[in-house]
Each structure stands twice: as structure tokens, then as C-alpha cells.
Amino acid sequence: MFLKKFKAKIVPSSSSWWLMARTAFKVAVVGAGGGIGQPLSLLLRQIEGIDELALHDLRGTKGVAADTGHISEQGTVSGYVGNEQLVPALQGANLVVVTAGMPRVPGMTRDSLMQANGGIAITVTRAMACACPEALIAITTNPINIIVPTAAEVLKEAGVFNPRRLFGVTTLDVVRSRKFIGDHMNIDPEKVNIPVIGGHTGPTILPLFSQCQPEFRGDTEDIERLTHRIKEAGTEVVMAKGGAGSATLSMAYATSSFVKSLIRAHNGQEGIIECSFVASCMENVPFFAGPLELGKEGIKRYLELPDLNEFEQKSLDKLLPILKKNIEAGINFAKTFE
Ligand code: LMR
């Protein structure tokens, strides 16, 4: 009986076999005191494989660290406050999640946040370039379509840009697609798989219903209605919050799910596919959200875009020029920032 119990303790479960043979993993969250950062920190505490969680913000993180540090999960949590503690928070991080920045209020587009959030992104990226140049970077700060190219430019200037390690988190678009399609088809949303490509603004988000698994049940009108809802879901939340910001809880949920995938892939789990906004290998658009296979060092493989139907192809043709303008704006922002 004793032997049986003992054996059960040392044999890892199939989901956590990789925990046995790995090195310590540090995650830093920048913006951890904010609306996304706080619930994200809570959710990250529940992810297997995070040994150290460093929570940074201009205020509030000592409390969030003490609070989440009392949860009966493995790993340590520390709070870092103010610009002078940014580099210490990032030092030695294997993964940095950037959530810092201002949210939208009704009437604003995500693009219009660039003035407020572009400078923050540059400061944080410069700090990452010096404190943890090899870290995986996951950015949720809006406008993602502009901020990610800005960050890439800053990393290039510092000579540490690795396109396989920089991600704009677009998982919320997939999460919303799963939920809306699952509800429409009367099935468990978690059983729905659908790639969402393009970028992360109303005009650039493109869910590929032709690739939906299980096969989408509905007519053209359903597809158009649901596509519109997925594209405008962020605005739906902004309107519902009536001036108190944008999606925080669902964004934290989606980001923690993306982080879980990054960590599992880093630890050797095979076949992990996620859509994310990254430096692309597509001919005419330098950044693009598309399906990727994740691996030990970030992106393992860029998956080819599937054959699109006429509606999807037309939508893609329409969104590419918008995306290109966003990307140019991001690169210019970095080049002209003082
Ligand atoms: C979202 O999709 O909910 C976020 O990008 C926040 C926003 O401003 O819409």
C-alpha cells in the first residue's frame, strides 16, 4: 500500500511530465496593477511551470503581489513599483507580458490610443532589450497593430530583435469567436476551433468560418452577423462599461490561455497552435495575425494560410492596406520618438 502511494507520487501525470526536467521559469507582467494586469496575475498563479512572477506597475503591485502570493500554488511573487524598478522586475525574465497602457472609452478607436500608449511601449521595450533580451514578449497593449511593429523597431535598434519571440496577443478574438459560434451552434464553446487572422481592430479582425471545426452550421447571414459581432466585440464591451474602460477580464482570460500555450510549448509539448500578431513571412505585409506552431523558442513554424472562400478573400484584400498603414505608423513612431 505504502509502495503504491509512493509510486503514485513520483510518477508525473501525463499533463505535467515536463515539469520534471526543466529549468526555472520567470514571468514578468508589466502593468500588473491595472484592469487587465490584476486578474491576469491571478490567472497566471494557476499556470503550471511559472516559478517566479514579477509584477510591475507605477503603483499597486506590492498589494497585488502580497495578495496573489498567498494563493496555495507553487512559485514566488514579487511586486515592483515605479520606473526605477522596471529593469529589476524584468531582469532574467523568460517571458514578459505587457499590459500597461490606457484603455478606450466610447467613441475612441484603438488606433487613437497610440499617442497615449506608444511612449509606454517604447520605454518598456527598451528596458526589455537591456534586462531580458532573449525573453519571449507578449503584448496586449493597444493598438496592437501599431504597438507590435513599434516594439520590433526598438528591439532592432538595440540589436536584439528575434521575430520568433515577439507576439501581439490576439487570443481574445479567438476566445470570442469560440463563444459566439458555440452559442450559435448550441455546443460547448471550448470545442470550437477557428483561426482568426489579420490584426486586432474592427476592420482587420477576420475569423475564418470556412475553417471552423466542427464545421459551421448556419447560413451566409449567420456568418455575416457573427463576423460583425466578433470584429466589434471590443467596442461592445467599451460601450457596456460606459466610460470605465474596455475588456479586462476576458482579455486576462485570453492572455493567460496564450501564456499557458507559450509555456507548454517552451517545455517541449508538441503541436501547440495559436493565432497571434507577429512579424510575418508573408510577401507584402510585414506583420500579420495568423496560425503559428509554438515551440521551445517561441514560434516554431508559420502555418500557411488555408484556402479562403470568396467572402474571406475579399475581406482579406480589404484589410491588408489598413494593416499596412498601421504597421508603417508603428515603425515611424519608433523612428521619430525622442
Ligand atoms: C478588446 O478587443 O476588447 C481590446 O482590444 C480592448 C478594446 O479597446 O477593444
Image: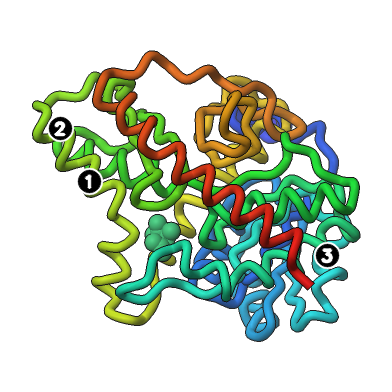
Q: Residue at x 23, y 19 (%)?
A: 215
Q: Residue 303, located in which quarter of the rendered image?
A: top right
**Pointers 2 and 1 in contact (CB under 8 A)?**
no
Q: Secondary structure at mark 1?
A: helix
Position in image of residue 182 (x %, y %): 22, 37
Q: Quadrant of the C terminus?
A: bottom right
Amino acid type for the residue under numbered disc 1: His
Return the disc, 3 or 1, that comes first in the chain's sequence. Answer: 3
CA–CA distance in space, label 3 to label 1: 38 Å
Does residue 1 appear in the picture of this structure?
Answer: no
In the image, residue 163 sits, relative to residue 104, either above or below, namely above
Q: Which residue is mark 3?
A: 127
CA–CA distance in space, label 2 to label 1: 17 Å
Q: Which residue is mark 2?
A: 185
Return the disc, 2 or 1, that comes first in the chain's sequence. Answer: 2
Q: Nearer the viewer, residue 69 or 163?
A: 163
Q: Residue at x 68, y 77 (%)?
A: 57
**Numbered label attached to residue 228:** 1
Task: Determine crowd level at label 3: few under 14, some 14-19, many 20+ residues with C-alpha closer than 10 A.
Answer: some
